[in-house]
Amino acid sequence: MRDLLNSKLAFAAKAEHIWWGVSVENRKYGLPRIANLRDCRVSVRFLSVEPLLEDVGALNLEGIHWVIVGGESGHGARPMDEAWVQSLLQQCRAAGVEFFFKQWGGVRKAEAGRLLNGQTYDEMPQRTTVDDEEQRIRLARGKKNSRRRTLAVRVSGDRGRRVGTSR
């Protein structure tokens, strides 16, 4: 991924409306992906720490803008320890990184919910939109405001997965 984003896909890496992320499910496979992501010249970097399968320890969050945390869900879901989630929350706070808690997971994830410390954590990096000057020029010319869409891409191993768009 790093090599592609810094060469053939540099045009996509530089697009401010595309956010790039990696899965970090455990130390063995997930932690090396963080270093690779950090070496990419992209506008927004995020970690999808889900399913969180073990304590991933102290993370270097330098250059990371967003951390999404969640447990595994569905038949055979492995449990997630609250201490692991609390550690990630505290690390994000210390590094000034936005924190999003997705779910506790489990076989019946709706019952487990997504409250952490009695609240939901829905933080996100500021979305990229058309800058104010370009928007002002469009409005002056009578053209519609064509806001860009934000695309989040999470890479796990060698495969990219589009995880969502928003306006």
Image (spheres, rainbow, N blue to C red):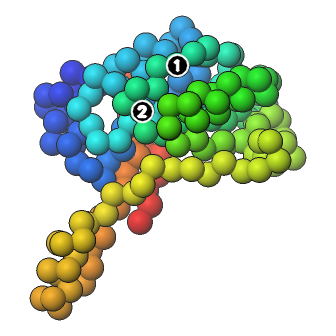
Q: Where does label 2 land, which residue? A: 64
Vertical side of 103 occupied by 127: above or below: below
Which residue in the protein does label 1 denote?
Answer: 59
Q: Give residue 77's quadrant in the image.
A: top right
The kind of residue tagged 1 is Leu
Q: In terms of sequence position, does the residue under pointer 1 or pointer 2 come before the other?
A: 1
Outermost residue, bottom side: 142
Q: What's the CA distance linking mark 1 and mark 2?
A: 10 Å
Residue 27 visible in the displayed image: yes
Which of 107/94 is in front?
Answer: 94
Residue displayed at 40% across by 26% down: 62
Quarter of the figure that contains the N terminus: top left
Image quarter of residue 167: bottom left
Please name the residue shown 76% across and 46% down the image. 114
Amino acid tagged 2? Ile
Identified at 35% across, 41% down, the residue is 44
**Is residue 157 toward the left or the right of residue 71 in the image?**
left
Q: Are marks 1 and 2 in contact (CB under 8 Å)?
A: yes
- Name of the residue lying farthest toward the front: 94
